[in-house]
Amino acid sequence: MESDEVMLTVRLTTAERTLLRRLAHGHRGDVSEVVADALLDVLPMLLTRDAPRPAEPPNRFAPCAVTVWLPPELVELLPALATHLATRYAAQHVPHPAPTPSAALGTALRLWLRQDPARLAAALQSLHGGHPHVRTAAA
């Protein structure tokens, strides 16, 4: 962890937390690293006008709290994502409180984790140079 990183807590389901941990373990990184990679992957899609609507409102309850450390440059994007999500839900007449940056992070992460776990593991492996010590998420 670098000293200039920002600590955030994100709420996930047990299955989502388990998958996240497996992906981190699979490329010998940590959960924060995987979350940062996930945001880099999913934010451009979420911030487009034609982005798919997340499956649930950004403030939905999830039983597990996961603490991550993210670079400030990524954290600075989360309020804009929260505002964007609030606007999209309001336009669709989906009632919910305004999402916090942590709730927006949870929404983005859940959207990313809904992809095929083997595809996610392969993308992480590719992103991190395809090191031979990398294991798949199923390992």
Image (cartoon, rainbow, N blue to C red):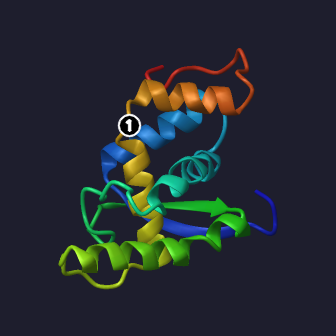
- Mark 1, Cα crowd under 10 Å, few <14 / some 14-19 / many 20+, is few
Q: Name the secondary structure under disc 1.
A: loop
Side of 104 where 40 appears, left or right: right
Name the image quarter holding residue 127: top right
Residue designated by label 1: 115
Q: Is residue 132 visible?
A: yes
Residue at (19% x, 81% y) in the render: 95
Residue at (65% x, 64% y) in the render: 74
The image shows residue 48, relative to residue 133, as above or below, that is: below
Residue at (62% x, 53% y) in the render: 36
Q: Tell me residue 104's x, y (percent).
A: 44, 69
Q: Nearer the viewer, residue 92 or 132?
A: 92
The image shows residue 25, relative to residue 2, as above or below, that is: above
Side of 41 where 110 appears, left or right: left
The image shows residue 37, relative to residue 95, as above or below, that is: above
Side of 71 where 100 appears, left or right: left
Q: Nearer the viewer, residue 77 or 5?
A: 77
